[in-house]
Amino acid sequence: MLACAAPLLLAYRSMTSANSPMSLILLTCCGSAINGPYALVTTAVSADLGTQSALLGRTRALATITSIIDGMGSLGAALGPLLTGLLVPYGWSVVFAMLITSDLLAMLMSIWIVVNSSRRQHRRTYYRLQSTIPI
Protein backbone atom coordinates (compact mmCIF):
# COMPACT_ATOMS: atom_id res chain seq x y z
CA MET A 1 0.00 0.00 0.00
CA LEU A 2 2.83 2.38 0.76
CA ALA A 3 4.15 1.78 -2.76
CA CYS A 4 0.80 3.04 -4.11
CA ALA A 5 0.80 6.18 -1.96
CA ALA A 6 3.60 8.04 -3.79
CA PRO A 7 2.03 7.71 -7.28
CA LEU A 8 -1.38 8.62 -5.83
CA LEU A 9 0.10 11.72 -4.20
CA LEU A 10 1.74 12.68 -7.49
CA ALA A 11 -1.58 12.23 -9.30
CA TYR A 12 -3.40 14.29 -6.68
CA ARG A 13 -0.80 17.06 -6.92
CA SER A 14 -1.30 17.26 -10.66
CA MET A 15 -5.08 17.72 -10.32
CA THR A 16 -6.10 21.11 -11.67
CA SER A 17 -9.52 21.25 -10.03
CA ALA A 18 -9.88 20.49 -6.34
CA ASN A 19 -13.67 20.40 -6.68
CA SER A 20 -13.86 17.49 -9.11
CA PRO A 21 -15.18 14.06 -8.05
CA MET A 22 -11.85 12.57 -9.16
CA SER A 23 -10.10 14.77 -6.59
CA LEU A 24 -12.27 13.29 -3.84
CA ILE A 25 -11.59 9.76 -5.04
CA LEU A 26 -7.82 10.35 -5.22
CA LEU A 27 -7.75 11.97 -1.79
CA THR A 28 -9.63 9.01 -0.29
CA CYS A 29 -7.23 6.58 -1.96
CA CYS A 30 -4.22 8.57 -0.70
CA GLY A 31 -5.54 8.47 2.85
CA SER A 32 -6.20 4.73 2.66
CA ALA A 33 -2.78 4.00 1.17
CA ILE A 34 -1.03 5.98 3.89
CA ASN A 35 -3.10 5.20 6.99
CA GLY A 36 -3.77 1.54 6.13
CA PRO A 37 -0.19 0.36 6.71
CA TYR A 38 0.09 2.46 9.89
CA ALA A 39 -3.03 0.88 11.38
CA LEU A 40 -1.92 -2.58 10.29
CA VAL A 41 1.60 -2.22 11.70
CA THR A 42 0.55 -0.87 15.09
CA THR A 43 -2.05 -3.62 15.49
CA ALA A 44 0.20 -6.42 14.22
CA VAL A 45 3.17 -5.38 16.35
CA SER A 46 1.05 -5.12 19.49
CA ALA A 47 -0.53 -8.52 18.81
CA ASP A 48 2.87 -10.07 18.09
CA LEU A 49 4.32 -8.65 21.29
CA GLY A 50 1.50 -10.26 23.25
CA THR A 51 2.72 -13.69 22.15
CA GLN A 52 6.41 -13.17 22.98
CA SER A 53 7.61 -15.48 25.74
CA ALA A 54 9.74 -12.71 27.29
CA LEU A 55 6.63 -10.59 27.87
CA LEU A 56 4.19 -13.27 29.01
CA GLY A 57 2.68 -12.17 32.30
CA ARG A 58 4.42 -8.80 32.14
CA THR A 59 1.45 -6.66 31.24
CA ARG A 60 3.14 -3.46 32.33
CA ALA A 61 6.08 -3.98 29.96
CA LEU A 62 3.72 -4.87 27.12
CA ALA A 63 1.63 -1.76 27.80
CA THR A 64 4.77 0.39 27.81
CA ILE A 65 5.98 -0.95 24.47
CA THR A 66 2.52 -0.60 22.91
CA SER A 67 2.24 3.00 24.13
CA ILE A 68 5.67 3.82 22.66
CA ILE A 69 4.51 2.49 19.29
CA ASP A 70 1.30 4.53 19.44
CA GLY A 71 3.23 7.56 20.69
CA MET A 72 5.49 7.49 17.64
CA GLY A 73 2.39 7.57 15.44
CA SER A 74 1.05 10.53 17.39
CA LEU A 75 4.40 12.29 17.08
CA GLY A 76 4.28 11.83 13.32
CA ALA A 77 0.70 13.13 13.25
CA ALA A 78 1.85 16.24 15.12
CA LEU A 79 4.99 16.88 13.07
CA GLY A 80 3.28 16.47 9.68
CA PRO A 81 1.09 19.59 9.96
CA LEU A 82 3.98 21.52 11.52
CA LEU A 83 6.27 20.72 8.59
CA THR A 84 3.44 21.46 6.16
CA GLY A 85 2.96 24.90 7.71
CA LEU A 86 6.67 25.61 7.45
CA LEU A 87 6.86 24.45 3.82
CA VAL A 88 3.68 26.06 2.39
CA PRO A 89 5.41 29.43 1.79
CA TYR A 90 7.75 27.61 -0.62
CA GLY A 91 4.83 26.21 -2.64
CA TRP A 92 2.62 23.16 -2.63
CA SER A 93 5.10 21.22 -4.77
CA VAL A 94 7.52 21.29 -1.84
CA VAL A 95 4.77 20.08 0.53
CA PHE A 96 3.96 17.16 -1.77
CA ALA A 97 7.68 16.39 -2.10
CA MET A 98 7.86 16.17 1.72
CA LEU A 99 4.81 13.85 1.80
CA ILE A 100 6.21 11.61 -0.92
CA THR A 101 9.65 11.54 0.73
CA SER A 102 8.19 10.53 4.09
CA ASP A 103 6.10 7.85 2.38
CA LEU A 104 9.14 6.43 0.59
CA LEU A 105 11.19 6.48 3.82
CA ALA A 106 8.43 4.59 5.63
CA MET A 107 8.31 2.06 2.80
CA LEU A 108 12.10 1.56 2.86
CA MET A 109 12.12 1.09 6.63
CA SER A 110 9.28 -1.42 6.37
CA ILE A 111 11.13 -3.38 3.69
CA TRP A 112 14.29 -3.36 5.84
CA ILE A 113 12.36 -4.72 8.83
CA VAL A 114 10.70 -7.46 6.76
CA VAL A 115 14.01 -8.53 5.19
CA ASN A 116 15.80 -8.70 8.57
CA SER A 117 12.90 -10.55 10.14
CA SER A 118 12.85 -13.05 7.27
CA ARG A 119 16.60 -13.61 7.60
CA ARG A 120 16.29 -14.27 11.34
CA GLN A 121 13.40 -16.68 10.76
CA HIS A 122 15.34 -18.45 8.02
CA ARG A 123 18.39 -18.82 10.30
CA ARG A 124 16.25 -20.19 13.14
CA THR A 125 14.64 -22.73 10.82
CA TYR A 126 18.01 -23.71 9.34
CA TYR A 127 19.64 -24.25 12.76
CA ARG A 128 16.59 -26.11 14.03
CA LEU A 129 16.82 -28.44 11.02
CA GLN A 130 20.58 -28.85 11.52
CA SER A 131 20.10 -29.86 15.15
CA THR A 132 17.64 -32.62 14.21
CA ILE A 133 19.91 -34.28 11.63
CA PRO A 134 21.63 -37.31 13.20
CA ILE A 135 25.38 -37.52 12.80
Image (tube, rainbow, N blue to C red):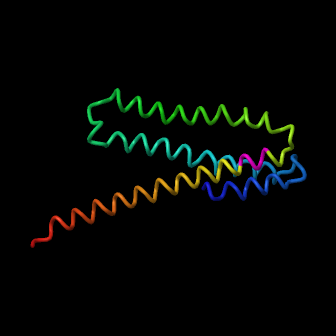
* Residue at the image position 60 percent from the left and 32 percent from the top: 75
101 with respect to 50 (left or right): right
Residue 22 quadrant: bottom right
Which quadrant: the N terminus? bottom right
Which quadrant: the C terminus? bottom left
57 with respect to 83 (left or right): left
Give the magenta part as a residue range: 95-99
88 with respect to 1 (left or right): right
Q: Position of residue 92 (x, y in %)?
A: 84, 45
Residue at far left of view: 135
Residue at far top of view: 60
Q: Main secondary structure of the magenta part?
A: helix
Residue 97 among those drawn in magenta: yes
Residue 5 quadrant: bottom right
Residue at far right of view: 16
* Residue at the image position 49 percent from the left and 41 percent from the top: 42
Residue 77 among those drawn in magenta: no
Q: Position of residue 115 (x, y in %)?
A: 45, 59
* Residue at the image position 87 percent from the left and 47 percent from the top: 18
Q: Position of residue 55 (x, y in %)?
A: 30, 36
Q: How many marks?
A: 0
Q: Position of residue 48 (x, y in %)?
A: 38, 45
* Nearer to the camera, 13 or 106: 106
Vertical arrangement, residue 91 with respect to residue 86, above or below:
below
Residue 6 quadrant: bottom right
